[in-house]
Amino acid sequence: MNVLHMKYVVEVAQSGSLNKASEKLLIAPPNLSRCIKELEADLGIRVFDRTNKGMKLTPEGEEFILYARNILKQIDALEDLYKSDGQQKQRFSVSVPRASYISDAFARFSTQLADTPSELFYKETNSIRAIKNVLSDDYKLGIIRYASIYDRQFKQMLDEKGLIYEMIAEFHYVLVMNAKSPLLEKETISFADLEPLIEIAHGDPYVPSLPLAAVRKEELPDDVKRRICVFERASQFDLLCENPQTYMWVSPIPEAILERLDLRQKPCADNKKLYKDVLIYRKDYRLSPLDKLFITEVCNSRRNCFA
């Protein structure tokens, strides 16, 4: 089997189109198609179904792509090892929820890297994408967030996917707001106090085996009159800093970040819902020293914020 042909197949799978892949690979579409057919003939399988809408992976093709990506990553790692005079690059990757205590931990973690070459990937996303990132081996670690009432659904899915999981935090959401927010005038905050204000939300809830509509109704209730869905935490903070009429539900935020942004956080007396942040990784993956260092920093940040 030709390794170059394997790279071509992975690129076509990622692009979903023979023409798009050929543009990126700088190969004429007929030649690319011929290479794919040669690989399929060598393996005795059909990797793609050719449709009017593009190249769709067959079940055999999906299995092949998982192996091919891992093989190509190992080849890249081997090349890096010898191209860098034997000094292997440290690699770390994690998909996490939009949480300031975790980003604070990552910042502290970054200050402790050795002088050896390193490459770090940190992606903030929702739970389903974090799980997919770990399963595809694009990211070695993941941290997913869900309401504790969905514990059974998530654990069942993680078991089925062959993922190790370990709870790293359990908490009630608090409210973060502008330093001039009218909520700060309240001794205690109730749900009714939020009614005239604008909620900032992620807008992408997910629970395995439950309809999206039911999850959205639970996580993003219809009784909120004004809501802005923003998917980037930096943009959320920009809104909070600019508009005193906004608020957001968050896991507790480190005081240093609140001071830097001139924001405030307070609990809501009516909020009884419990959430969990859970570390996940593949069963066949052994935690690296960098992984363990990051997890330690996350636990330290959690203790400081949730005390």
Image (spheres, rainbow, N blue to C red):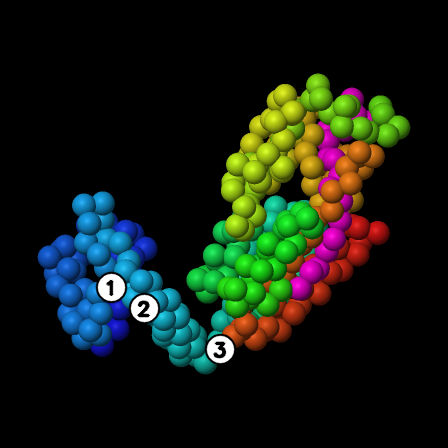
Q: Identify the residue position indicated by label 1 in the image.
A: 47
Judged left or right of residue 204, residue 17 is: left
Main structural element of the magenta stretch: helix, strand or loop?
strand
In-front residue for pair 121/192: 192
Residue 292 in the image: state x and y as whole percent: 65, 69
Q: Are marks 1 and 3 in contact (CB under 8 Å)?
A: no
- Image marks 2 and 1: residues in contact by CB distance under 8 Å: yes
Residue in the image at 71% along x and 22% along y: 195
Is residue 54 rendered magenta in the image?
no
Residue 220 appears in which quarter of the rendering? top right
- Check if residue 181 falls in the magenta segment: yes
**Measured from the top left, where is residue 28 in percent x and y?**
13, 56
Relative side of 177 to 83, left or right? right
Question: Dot 2 surroundings within 10 Å: few (below 14), some, or many (20 or more)?
Answer: some
Q: What residue is disc 2 on?
A: 64
2 or 3: mark nearer the eye: 2
